[in-house]
Amino acid sequence: MPEAGSEFERIAALLAALPPGEGVVVGPGDDAAVLRPRDGRDLVATTDAFVEGRHFRRDLLTPAEAGARLAVANLSDLAAMGAEPRWALLSLVVPKAWSQAECLLLERACARVLTADGAAIVGGNLAAAEGPFAATLALLGDVERGAAWRRVGARPGDVIAVTGFPGSAAAFTALALSGSPPSRARVPAAIVERVVAPASRVKLARALAASGGVTAAIDVSDGLAADLAHLCEASHVGARIDQASLPADAALNEAARALSTVPATEGDVLTRLRLGASDDYELLLSIEPSKWTDCERISHELGVPLARIGEFTSGSARVLAAASGREMPLDVPGWDHFSEQT
């Protein structure tokens, strides 16, 4: 019998009660999973790592909340390709500070979020090490052959649209760290909910894919302006963003007020939050103008906020147009793992 807390006992606990997945010929417990792709489909693969102290803090997120965000980070990548999630591999690097119970909470939350979109955890790895806790999820999905969305394909005149309320994750971090000790009690409840239980956009992506209106896509995980730049560069287009059309709600406005040094700066803070580095896991889409009404209707039916924020242009310039008509270069930096951001 393995001793309490041994590697094999921990693995057995992690594997217990994992929901089965469609197309799983051999699931967890063997040296590798055996998976059966569907005919006429292309495989889509992505992976993300969450490292404690870099991607999340234990004083601001519980293990279960970190697990949910890890799942949605990967689901967001598949949504940006118009793909359906199917199978996942979860690997944990566990220091002594993390208990078996905490690892189980993270894994169960991750599995629950994946299951809601049709994916199952079919294997992974467990290792002990010094240093920070790290969880890596690899997610496989599929899409109709040749139909995957890409960053390439946006055309001048196409609508620029974004889901949700980008900047919420940045507001969460800024407000939570604005005092000592760090606390999410300073953060509006609606923003806390978006961060600790982020919404997957897979169902919207699949519905929009069926409509045929999306010409290019990217997920917003580094920041709206930075991810827009990636899409523009891939598609060889420019962009004109209407500042007044950037989505905001009462919670984001409240956060901007709390972070403003004087009332006159509130609008600037709100704009920086919505455009700057922020891991929101939303979708930034290029939509054929004639299909915009259909896409807007689909998003409304699914209860997903979808805002038309500008249009793609010829050339390479990316500008932010203020209500006054003044245009400013849109060069707000996004998240960079190798910068000094924390």
Image: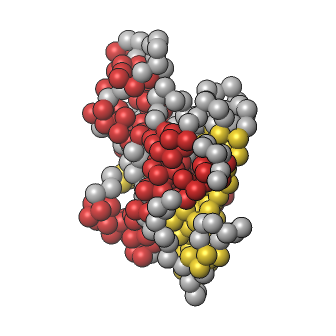
Residue 196 x/y as whole percent? 41, 40
**Which quadrant of the figure has residue 50?**
top right
Pick the front one: 326 or 50: 50
Residue 191 x/y as whole percent? 36, 35
Q: Is residue 269 above or below residue 1?
A: above
Say whether residue 254 is left or right of residue 119: left
- Specify the quadrant that holds the C terminus: top right
Identify the residue at horizontal 65%, vertical 32% (top origin).
Answer: 96
Pick the front one: 148 or 60: 60
Identify the residue at horizontal 42%, vertical 76% (top origin).
Answer: 210
Identify the residue at horizontal 56%, vertical 84% (top origin).
Answer: 38
Pick the front one: 317 or 152: 152
Name the colour scheme: secondary structure
Pick the front one: 250 or 178: 178
Say whether residue 125 is left or right of residue 300: right
Residue 218 seen from this side = no
Identify the residue at horizontal 67%, vertical 69% (top origin).
Answer: 30
Residue 57 seen from this side = yes
Residue 88 x/y as whole percent? 58, 62
Residue 85 x/y as whole percent? 51, 67
How many marks the image carries: the answer is 0
**Which quadrant of the figure has residue 244?**
top left
Residue found farthest to the front: 1
Q: Is residue 290 above or below residue 49?
A: below
